[in-house]
Image (tube, rainbow, N blue to C red):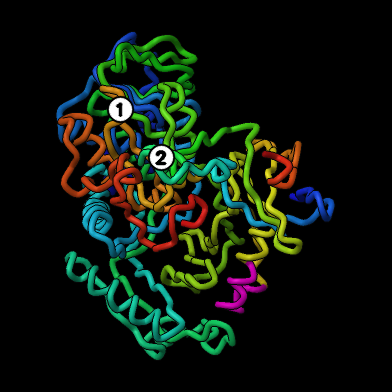
Amino acid sequence: MRFSGFRVLKEGFGGNRGWKLQWRKPDPKPAYDMLIIGGGGHGLATAYYLAKNHGMTNVAVLEKGYLGSGNIGRNTTIVRANYFLPGNSEFYSHSLKLWEGLEEELNYNVMHSQRGLINLFHSDGQRDAFARRGNAMLAQGDDAILLDREGVRAILPYLDFEQARFPIYGGLYHKRGGTARHDAVAWGYARGADLRGVDLIENCEVTGMSVESGRVSGVSTTRGEISARKVGIVTAGRTSQVAAMAGLRLPIESHILQAFVTEGLKPCIDHVVSFGMGHFYISQSDKGGLVFGGDLDFYPSYASRGNLPGVEQVMEAGMTLMPMIGRAKILRSWGGIMDMTPDGSPIIDRTPIDGLYLDAGWCYGGFKAVPASGWCMAHLMATDQPHPVARRFRLDRFATGRLLDEEGTGSQHNLH
Amino acid sequence: MRLPCPCCGWRDLREFTCIGAADYLERPTADAPPEAWDAYLHVRDNPAGPARELWYHDPCGTWLVVERDTVMHAVTGSRAVEDAQ
């Protein structure tokens, strides 16, 4: 079933009775060539690109809940490529290029909106750092414009420029940054993978992993035993538990990140605005809700809900930056489980167990990475070689010292 | 959430800093192999359930080992580091 404007009209005139389910609900087969554990954005994208780029269709995605029920279904939807370090820079650049063609690629409206992202700075030193970052982005082939205070004021007149603690000196403007409809991305990849023959198996929790003489041979699930040559772990905040089934300990700690959405308002915030000094960032959804978030709750948690000091910090930062939002009512908040690594960068790599692959450690930046993560994980699983743009996302980089500490905050998991 | 400090009793979360898993207390010796340092600094059990963590109580300067459930957030124990070891 392909979507098109004509199809929408035709169904509209026909009472919308012609739409069909977008993917099958197959029962698991006893064996596949490859298994992907985790039916979120990264797992579904991996399955899609395994089928599309590598012709691997005897593949199943195992999801313990429903597809897209984790962080892909609850996030602040920001898409950007404003990274500095070699390793991160080329990867996120690749991802943004995939985003720009994603709707045509998937024949699915993911509502990718390149409304522009502005990172504010508040001192001369920070301006220097942002100029350097902007140059790195330009050198990578992406876009960046360094704005002074008046430049920011022309675009974001509603900010409090004279706040005493962090007066706004300017901003780094990344025009190709923006937002997308988060769960449509999961649905688009799911439908694309299903169309190519991948089995998407919901309500199928992996409960054990079979490893024989250093090689993975399959998994046990709540829907029976499934054998496979290759298994990919793509389970975000629950990565440590799944890896433990294969006897692995990983450099990951799971933390909660909160986000909030207000009642629907008329359009007022046309960009993504990031206020790093206050740990606050905001955009407005197409429904009109202000979507914003802050920093981690700072202690390990799997509770899927945040604490009140976290709420307080975010609200204070929001009021500091843009007092105009003070009377908007918060509709809801949520807390996602983040797989935090000690350097804040992800892992796409083989593991010490043959046939077992890992795509994890996305910290709180996983959404924008979905297309490239799937692309590179599929490449790794199909060819056993790291994709060139993901070659530095190694599992052993912590032992070898080749860290990718984008923020330069050290080796503690909760500081990224 | 509130945490019990052995010096000050139950105090608000805002007064505490979480360092991470209590693994940070098991520092390898200077001649330990690199793998031991990697495990100490980076690798974690990351349990979903009962956990032992290293916390710091800012007002009184006490380092704490807190036993806490990472799913339910129930605190089952808290001792000063020197008593916990």
Lateral position of residue A374 relative to residue B4, left or right? left
Mark carried by residue A352 = 1
> At numbered mark 1, what does the secondary structure look like: helix, strand or loop?
loop
Toward the viewer: A22 or A236? A236
Residue A294, given in percent of the width and then of the height, sits at 54, 61
Q: Nearer the viewer, mark 2 or mark 1?
A: 2
Residue A87, given in percent of the width and then of the height, sits at 24, 54
Which quadrant holds residue B8? bottom right
Where does the magenta region start and end?
A315-326
Residue A186, given in percent of the width and then of the height, sits at 38, 40
Residue B7, given in percent of the width and then of the height, sits at 82, 53
> Residue at point 43% right, 13% down?
A220
Chain containing the residue with disc 1: A
Toward the viewer: A309 or A410? A410
Question: Is residue B38 at all visible to an observer of this figure?
Answer: no
Mark carried by residue A298 = none
Labels 2 and 1 positioned on one and the same chain: no
Dominant secondary structure of the residues highlighted in magenta in the image: helix
Question: In this rendering, is residue A147 above or below A283?
Answer: below
Residue that numbered label 2 is attached to: B32
